[in-house]
Amino acid sequence: MEYQDYFGFAIAKELIFGNGSIKYVPEILKDKLKVKKPLIVADPGVVKAGHVEGFVKNLEREKIPFELFDQVEPEPPIENVLDCVEKAKGKGCDSIVAIGGGSAIDLAKVASCLLKYGGDIRDYLGQENIPGETIPIVAVPSTAGTGSEVSAGAILSDVKTNTKVGVRSNHFRPRFAVLDPELTFSCPKSVTASAGFDVLAHAVGSYTMADHKCMPKGTVIFYGSNPFADPLATAAIELVGQYLRTAVHEGHNREAREKMMLASLLAGSAFSNTGVTMGHNITYPVAGITHAPHGVLLAVLLPAVLEFNIPVRMERLAHVAALLGEEVEGLSTAEAATKGIGAIRRLIEDIQLPSTLSQLGVKKQDIPVMAEKAMPVLSALPWNPRATSLEDLIGVYNRAY
């Protein structure tokens, strides 16, 4: 196998970060993108919180016509995307504003492709199958978690096969990402915890990824850990250690909400260029059984994955311990690395997320089946720093049980 001799980096083309920054979106549409009629894509949660109503009033004040699709489903099924496209088809929509969590932004990405190029969603599954630029997206995240506002990927549910499917292309990176921490104040405690742990999983998964020099030649989008992304990932880890507990238990703590949204941006920028360890990829068979939120699945699986990866990522996991505030002076590298994983387990407990597969309703006999389903994904995306056999994966699932 030939290996990559360079790394790359890309995020959303422009960023705006700050409390109240959603008010600048009409100006972005009119003066920067120069579009005429956006499609607003939102989930029922942000509608209920009043964020869409306030935004629509701003559009009306600026005399910007729009269409609204506010029925985004969690982990959106393919059919949900098609409903959105049907809503906008023939209405002259030349841009999309996605307001919500990762589901809304992911749906908007795929819809932007279908509105521009048509065809069947399945034609675009996988990596770099988008023909070119899609209609522009302005992503306005309402959670601090997925990093979808800067990433190149979209994850959908295929109800027919009971699996998750992905579309990845740098053409999917939003034209603008508008990060307004005030939108996260309305997030329920459970969503804050799950999304916030997703931030940590992105950051740790990026930082402990296979090195870019060990990635297969011809890799696109995900280049492996590298000197540009590493500082973003480590900064995110430190912020999560300092602020996630407060954001979960004191939802209106302005500083904690701001820092967690910054952590989400940093982690999203890192992992969407490096890729992540197998912690994310092995969640999909579990999701098919439990339908648990992605961040919850990561809380259950990430510690077991990190324990499996200790032999090849010991120094970096020792650094994770220090970033999370653990005292590591005088410890061996192995002891410090183990302490880092222990710190992650305590964080999971403190933010009241499940920590075992059995808590999610997975049965012991499900494990070999889940491992069989996960192996093709791991084989197609060989990014975990430690080579993983079917028996290894069964062991990881058993460790998480």
Image (tube, rainbow, N blue to C red):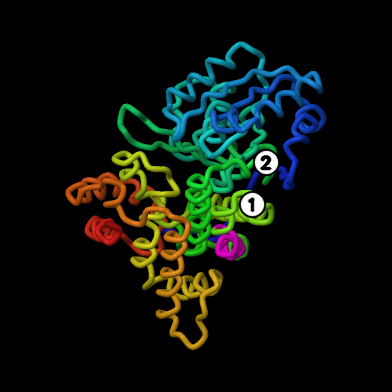
Rounded to the nearest angstrom, the CA distance separating label 1 from label 2 is 17 Å
Check the picture and name the quadrant holding the C terminus.
bottom left
Q: Secondary structure at mark 1?
A: helix
Closest to the observer, 156 or 286:
286
Q: Is the residue 329 above or below the residue 358 in the image?
A: below
**Label 2 amino acid?**
Ala
Horizontal and vertical percent for residue 78? Answer: 43, 27
Residue at 53 percent across and 21 percent down: it is 84
The residue to which callout 1 is attached is 257
Q: Residue tagged by mark 2?
A: 177
State the image coordinates of residue 165 (x, y, percent, origin top left).
40, 36
Can residue 9 be seen from the camera position used here? Answer: no
Instruction: Tell me which residue sits at (75%, 41%) in the image.
Output: 20
Q: Nearer the viewer, residue 94 or 257?
A: 257
Residue 29 falls in image quadrant: top right
Residue 178 seen:
yes
State which quadrant residue 247 falls in.
bottom right
The N terminus lies in which quarter of the figure? Answer: bottom left
Q: Position of residue 309 (x, y in %)?
A: 37, 66
User: Residue 258: image x %, image y %?
Assistant: 67, 52
In the image, which disc is placed on residue 56?
A: none
Residue numbers of the magenta segment: 233-244
Residue 336 to residue 271: above or below: below
Q: Is residue 114 magenta?
A: no
Q: Amino acid at mark 1?
A: Arg
Question: In the displayed structure, does residue 305 sit left or right of residue 365?
Answer: right
Which residue ends up furthest to the left in the rendered image?
Answer: 365
Q: Is residue 272 left or right of residue 38?
A: left
Determine the residue positioned at 57% across, 42% down: 187
In the image, taking residue 27 as reference, residue 85 lies left or right, namely left
